[in-house]
Image (spheres, grey):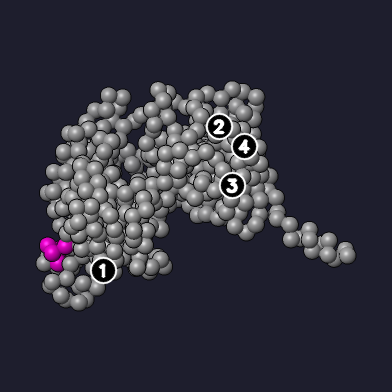
Amino acid sequence: MASDVSASVASMPTMISKDVIVLGGGFAGVAAAQHLAGKGAEVLLIDKNNYHQFQPLHYQVATSQIGVSEVARPLREMFRRHADVRVLVSEVSAIDPVAKTVTLADGRVCQAKTLVVAVGAEANYFGIPGAEEHTYPMYTLDDALRLGAQMVSELDHADTANDASRSLDLVVVGGGATGVELAGAVADNLRSVVPTLFSPDFARATTVHLVDMVPTVLGPFSEKSQKYARAHLGELGVELRLGVGVTEVKPDGVTLADGSTIPATIIVWAGGLKASRLIAESGMPQGRGGRVDVNTELTVPGFPGVYVLGDSANITDSKGRALPQLGSVAQQSGKWAARNIHADLTGGHREPFRYRDKGIMAMIGRGAAVAEVGPGRRQIQGPLAFLAWLGVHAALLSGVWQRVGAFASWGAAYLTHNRPQVVLASDTGKPRPQ
């Protein structure tokens, strides 16, 4: 009998209790944990990866302009000086916002006085047949590595085959910043790198297509910036198919709403994001994009002590306008949530989130970018915007060595036409979509 009781007790899930649990090591989660450190609360930061990833530069990893070490920084290294912040690497299987508990894949249960949910997003395929099965999404570092490895593999195969008629046609679905930056980077490689390392004929025979159902690129930008982006993409050789959506994706290309098709060796999905499945399964109210519509203090209506941030939340500014899913919004919401959580734990008062709009930027190949910065959204295009883009993104990287490495890689990539950070096929074990 005693042995049965002991076995039963041993089989019970381990309970981990903390003052604050932060789910997600992205911009929002890391910012929240960093600003709670040293404030008298025990914090548990949970992520399935042991590193923080800088998502705006994933496309540069895929196109060999920058290395993994520049965009991924170990979470434990980031919090090594903060004894009150513990990093736990584990997959989350369920969230209970009522009990403020988190169940891990190994059965352990974590409970906190305050729960911060910043679990990011995943690709939204909008129910388009074949999109999930046959495309490469561009959200995680794994996605970037897989895409980069496949592009290198296709280049190697074409070079080995020594077939002048062979081409590596690539379709990018989505005309937002991610799609534009990736299409521009690949086209830039075809102009300056592929002819030297492989074959000029092969480079000329290869085409990058950018497809979007809306009639322009870079929707949040001004018409002037959009016009510049379209013109420069055209100069790089990118074929734009705007104002017509994708209705089906097959292993060898896409079908568009007008009945036409675009053959492709590789298809990249940059067509939108939705909240993680954990949000849908948690019972929290879902709004646009499957995200949680949070209160002005970043809490969840009807769930005291629960905050939702970053790409998991629909956040508004002080005037009630919806804020975009940007790294700057996630970072600022993480810092603000930390202030409100500290107020919760010390008997203070929460304050409504006030977002400081620093502007938006997008790179469109070597020496070309668009930027709209400052309160008045001053518009800059061309080399000056390109330099501003480099400076801002370097400043946003999470560590000194990441910034040094980024500038070294950019110098080699943009000044010498070299690609020192080539993504090898062995860098990822994930197969190509079938």
| Marks 4 and 2 close (CB-CB < 8 Å) | no
Closest to the observer: 219 or 326? 219
Residue 114: which disc? 4
| Residue 237 is a magenta residue | no
Numbered tag placed on residue 95 in the rendering = 3
Q: Which residue is mark 2?
A: 301
Q: In this figure, which residue is indicated by the disc labeled 1?
A: 154
Pointers 4 and 3 in contact (C-beta within 8 Å): no
Distance from disc 4 to disc 3, alpha carbons, whole Å, reads 13 Å
Residue type highlighted by circle 2: Pro
What amino acid does circle 1 point to? Glu
Label 3 amino acid? Answer: Ile
Marked residue nearer the N-terminal end (2 or 3): 3
Give the residues in magenta.
202-206
- Magenta-drawn stretch, dominant element (helix, strand or loop): helix
Amino acid type at circle 4 is Thr
Counting other residues with Cα less than 10 Å from the Cα at mark 4, is it few (<14), some (14-19), or many (20 or more)? Answer: many
In the displayed structure, does residue 379 sit left or right of residue 281? Answer: left
